[in-house]
């Protein structure tokens, strides 16, 4: 498959690039800075995934619909895993607008990484995670930005999208290839933790890219 990945230089994006290359796909890795793209290329050169597909490095900004249209032309899927720096959370919804307007009317699917805070509390469908007692105040700006991002994607037309919410904790870890899928409720494992490694999250992104199961809807993954 031909896959474009925005946010390719980030923690989740880098793992999605590696997972896609391991599966033999043709990957266009997009970032905003030449330096971070070069670091990505360097890390892939020293740690080349087995069964490597082809890799192209491109500069582009998700908030620029022209960049999105140019870098997704002829591609099967665009995966987006962008994250604004702290204090610029508003950029997340602006990026989502760039993505959906750049893809509108095209045949390229959108698999977009979002946040966990818009999921509902287990067993309480009326309460979003962000509104639950004890939700960390310092995470509120990015949580609300992710909710806005989801609203932008939901309000789009002419795009076949899937919005993927991680569980509460998404951190570097190991690739097991195993995960569970849910819809709008936060997934919590038998151990009481709501967690997935970034490596297995990348597996879930690529599984959805290869075998689309979610169309114009949100889903979540976790252990
Ligand atoms: N539990 C949770 O809900 C949870 C936990 C962790 C992460 N996440 C989500 O996972 C996603 C990825 O997070 P991460 O940890 O991988 O972030 P990260 O390591 O900070 O990487 C973010 C990447 O986004 C890129 N970027 C930012 N704005 C962009 C734009 N407008 N156009 C193109 N690229 C842009 C940055 O690249 P440059 O600055 O180099 O261009 C960077 O490579 C985010 O949506 C985040 O909210 C959710």
Image (cartoon, helix red, strand yellow):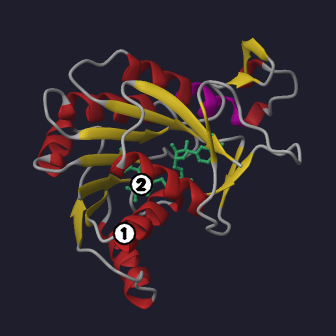
Marks 1 & 2, CB-CB < 8 Å contact:
yes
Q: Which of 114 and 32 is in front in this view?
A: 114
For the residue labelled by badge 1, is the local secondary structure a helix, a strand or a loop? loop
For disc 2, does the CB lie below 8 Å from ligand 1?
Answer: no
| Residue 111: percent from left, percent from top | 38, 41
Position of residue 86 measured from the top left corner of the image (x, y, whole percent): 58, 43
What residue sits right under mark 1 in the picture? 23
The spot of residue 164 in percent (x, y) is 50, 38
Tell whether position 166 is magenta: no
Q: Residue at x 49, y 65 (%)?
A: 15
Q: Who comes first in sequence, dot 1 or dot 2?
A: 1
Residue depicted at 29% across the width and 47% down the height: 78
- Image quadrant in which you'd find residue 45: bottom left
Percent position of residue 110, x then y: 32, 38
Residue 206: mark: 2
State whether residue 95 is above or below residue 23. Answer: above
Q: In this view, does 97 lie above or below 199?
A: above
Prevailing SS of the magenta stretch: helix
Q: Residue at x 26, y 56 (%)?
A: 3
| Residue 141 magenta | yes
Q: What stretch is highlighted in magenta?
A: 139-145
Q: Residues within 10 Å of mark 1 (few under 14, many from 20)?
A: some
Question: Which quadrant would residue 120 be assigned to in this image?
Answer: top right
Q: CA–CA distance between discs 1 and 2?
A: 9 Å
Q: Estimate how packed mark 2 is, as few (under 14), some (14 to 19) or many (20 or more) residues with alpha carbons within 10 Å.
A: many
């Amino acid at each position: 498959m031909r896959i474009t990945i925005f946010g390719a230089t980030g923690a989740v994006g880098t793992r999605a690039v590696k997972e896609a290359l391991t599966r033999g796909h043709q990957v266009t890795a997009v970032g905003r800075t030449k330096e971070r793209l070069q670091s990505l290329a360097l890390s892939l050169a020293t740690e080349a995934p087995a069964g490597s597909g082809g890799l192209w490095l491109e500069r582009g900004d998700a908030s620029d619909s022209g960049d999105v249209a140019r870098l997704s032309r002829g591609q099967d899927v665009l995966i987006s895993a962008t994250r604004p720096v702290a204090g610029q959370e508003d950029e997340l919804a602006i990026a989502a607008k760039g993505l959906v307007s750049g893809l509108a009317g095209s045949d390229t699917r959108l698999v977009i990484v979002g946040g966990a805070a818009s999921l509902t509390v287990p067993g309480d469908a009326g309460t979003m995670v962000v509104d639950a007692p004890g939700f960390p105040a310092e995470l509120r700006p990015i949580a609300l930005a992710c909710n806005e991002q989801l609203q932008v994607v939901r309000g789009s037309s002419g795009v076949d999208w899937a919005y993927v919410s991680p569980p509460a904790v998404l951190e570097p870890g190991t690739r097991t290839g195993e995960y569970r899928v849910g819809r709008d409720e936060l997934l919590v494992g038998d151990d009481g933790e709501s967690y997935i490694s970034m490596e297995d999250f990348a597996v879930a992104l690529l599984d959805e890219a290869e075998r689309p199961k979610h169309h114009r809807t949100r889903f979540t993954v976790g252990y």
